[in-house]
Amino acid sequence: MRSGDPAAIKQAYRSLGAYLEDAAGDDLERVPVLSFPETTPVVAAQVPGDARLVLDAGCGPHPALGICLGAAGRTVVALDIGAGTVRLARSVAARAGVSLLGIVGDVERLPFRDGSFDAVVCDDTIEHLPDDRQGAAELARVTRPAGTVVVATPNRRSLEVLWRKAGDRVRGRHLPPSHYYAAESHLREYTPSELSRVVAGSLQVRRFATVGWSGGRRARWATRAVQRRPLRGLTRTVVAVTTPR
């Protein structure tokens, strides 16, 4: 990841799919969900009820979002760059009683015709792409005119991150922004305004949805705080609800 070489990064994710498949074996309980669980219901709620064919772009090995959408009666195409990742995604979904159409493909070069989907969801993926603007352009291209594209990604300036940074500053620690990323494999993370600028050439942001935290009293307080207008930009996950330009 540190090399910044796009081909090497993509090969790493292909290899990751194979490693995860080998590690899981027949025990699908071991397959990890590689995104915040609180994000799934929020993103799913942004997909219009009349969207029947939906692309989950970057489904991951445990496609919680694709399963949620498929359970609602939609046809879901689950795409990821690793063959092992896609096979795991289909197996995990089947165990949950949901059939996904699995496709191995690159979000920066989606193997679909223009306007193929009623809606596209892309959760915890754009921050992994070497060319995030090209990825956004592809999400827009394969969505029908007036369709919905929901892009979700960890907020690098969430209330939780600010709290952690403040604690480090009090201790005299000044760490680089990447120290606070949700995962070391992220090439970058965004604030709502930064994500808006990345997708602006191909997607028009209609609104942002808010994602909070689950857990104890502090999590409940933080969730209530980011639902208020002055603090909405501190949401745990940036969820941009967009339409193709």
Image (cartoon, helix red, strand yellow):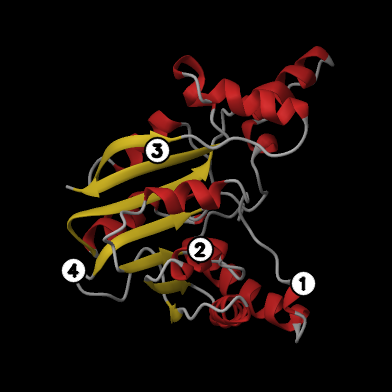
Answer above or below: position of 123 versus 97. above
Precedes in sequence: disc 4 or disc 2? 2
Which residue occupies the foreground of this view, 238 or 67?
A: 67
| Residue 235 x/y as whole percent | 54, 31
> What residue did someone put label 1 on?
30
Precedes in sequence: disc 1 or disc 2? 1
Examine the image and state in which quarter residue 181 appears.
Answer: top right
Q: Amino acid at mark 3?
A: Leu
> What residue did someone put label 2 on?
68
Instruction: State yes or no: discs 1 and 2 in contact (Cβ < 8 Å).
Output: no
Q: Amino acid at mark 4?
A: Asp
In the image, which disc is placed on residue 195?
Answer: 3
Q: Amino acid at mark 2?
A: Cys
Which residue occupies the foreground of this view, 75 or 194?
A: 75
* 79 relative to 124 in the view: left or right: left
| Residue 155 x/y as whole percent | 54, 35
| Residue 215 x/y as whole percent | 75, 38
Q: Is residue 129 visible?
A: yes
